[in-house]
Image (tube, grey):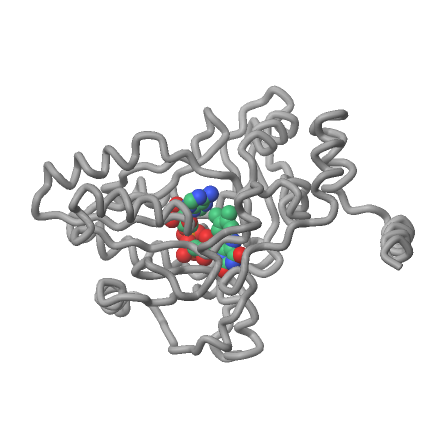
Amino acid sequence: MNSSSGGAFTALSDVFLKQGNAVLCSIYDYSSFKPRFQLVLTFEERDCARGSKYVQADMNLAFRESVDWLESHNDRKLAFFGLGCQAASFQQYMKLSGLEDRVVIVDIICHGVPSPKIWREYAKEVSNDGIMSHVNFRDKKTGWNKSVGTAIVEGTEVSVQDYRRLYSTRNIIRPSCFACPYAKSDRDSDITIGDFWHIEKVMPDFYDPMGVSLVLIHSEKGEELFEQAKEAIESRISNENDCRQMNLEKPTDFPSTRDQFWEDYKKYGIAYIVNKYGTVKPLPQRILSKLGRALKSI
Ligand SMILES: Cc1cc2nc3c(=O)[nH]c(=O)nc-3n(C[C@H](O)[C@H](O)[C@H](O)COP(=O)(O)OP(=O)(O)OC[C@H]3O[C@@H](n4cnc5c(N)ncnc54)[C@H](O)[C@@H]3O)c2cc1C
């Protein structure tokens, strides 16, 4: 329930932690309203990293700390978990540090990552001067493929579904994500993990309403890690065709509303854009705006 899809991150990182190795992954930091990469050595810390955070994570000093840790633990290894761009930069850093043989790179399929500024302003607005003590961008209480955004503010659950809707409009995704060079299935990482979308159609007997992870293995190191994780998980072999999804083929499309969105935000602020782009409009209004868009495109 605490993982966003089928829990591949937990199964793979378990292997490293059980052997006294380290894991580098991002954990949400409530004081700065964004996730931060942290070196993790215990199961408790690792569990705090579970869940997809739809905000760009801060790398801060994590790369330097990883090198220091590996240099002072000569017989140990490290597994990195992060989005494609973060994984590529970490991999390059490890190559330059001469430590690449001791790291396993697991990258995560990504639709694009939103600007931290918009989430910070939204979270402050939703918290209404109260303290947000928990956030779940993909709460699976309504099921994995119908997940909702929830948070706890001053002990009370509040919805952050408007933010999820803003994310799905693609307007808050960083400009570089629309030209992402990592949005492909052939990658330089050891393993890629993500959601196995549409599994109910291609492998109905393996569908799980709480989510199934997709695991793409690219290297011998990746194969070895997966083999070690295998006894704790249920797995099936699929093929490239059945597990297709957009961001394994190309970057997310630039939305036609993006320029207007940022103009609106600069002029009127967060509450206005949440209301205009993030709320569900009554049906007649939705039909009218769809008609308007269709007429404009003729
Ligand atoms: C911004 C974003 C976009 C995504 N888009 C897609 C997509 O289009 N298609 C798809 O199949 N999957 C996508 N995912 C991946 C998916 O949502 C799950 O995170 C992934 O399948 C891992 O699930 P799990 O159950 O194994 O891990 P969990 O137990 O949920 O652990 C989540 C893992 O993701 C890491 N993580 C979470 N948020 C961030 C972040 N902001 N930056 C870096 N690392 C982070 C955590 O540190 C942890 O390692 C996306 C994830 C993110 C964060």
Q: Is residue 275 visible?
A: yes
Q: 145 and 82: which one is in front? A: 82
User: What residue sits 46% from the left and 62% below the top?
Assistant: 184
Counting the numbered discs, the total is 0
Quarter-wise, where is residue 9 in the image? bottom left
User: What residue sits 72% from the left and 39% below the top?
Assistant: 259
Q: Is residue 59 above or below residue 129?
A: below
Q: Is residue 36 above or below residue 232?
A: above
Looking at the picture, how far across and down is residue 112, in whole percent? 54, 48
User: What residue sits 33% from the left and 61% below the top?
Assistant: 191
Quarter-wise, where is residue 239 in the image? bottom left
Is residue 140 found left or right of 230 in the rendered image? right
Quarter-wise, where is residue 131 in the image? top right
Q: 211 and 188: which one is in front? A: 188
Q: Is residue 35 above or below residue 80?
A: above
Is residue 207 found left or right of 89 in the rendered image? right
Q: Is residue 88 above or below residue 127?
A: below
Looking at the picture, how far across and down is residue 171, in whole percent? 66, 43
Q: What residue occupies the far top of the structure in this picture?
A: 129
Looking at the picture, how far across and down is residue 107, in whole percent? 38, 54
Q: Is residue 1 visible?
A: no
Which quadrant would the C terminus be assigned to in this image? bottom right
Is residue 228 found left or right of 136 in the rendered image? left
Q: What residue occupies the far left of the structure in this picture?
A: 75
Looking at the picture, how far across and down is residue 207, in whole percent? 51, 72
Q: 228 and 79: which one is in front? A: 79
Q: 198 and 181: which one is in front? A: 181
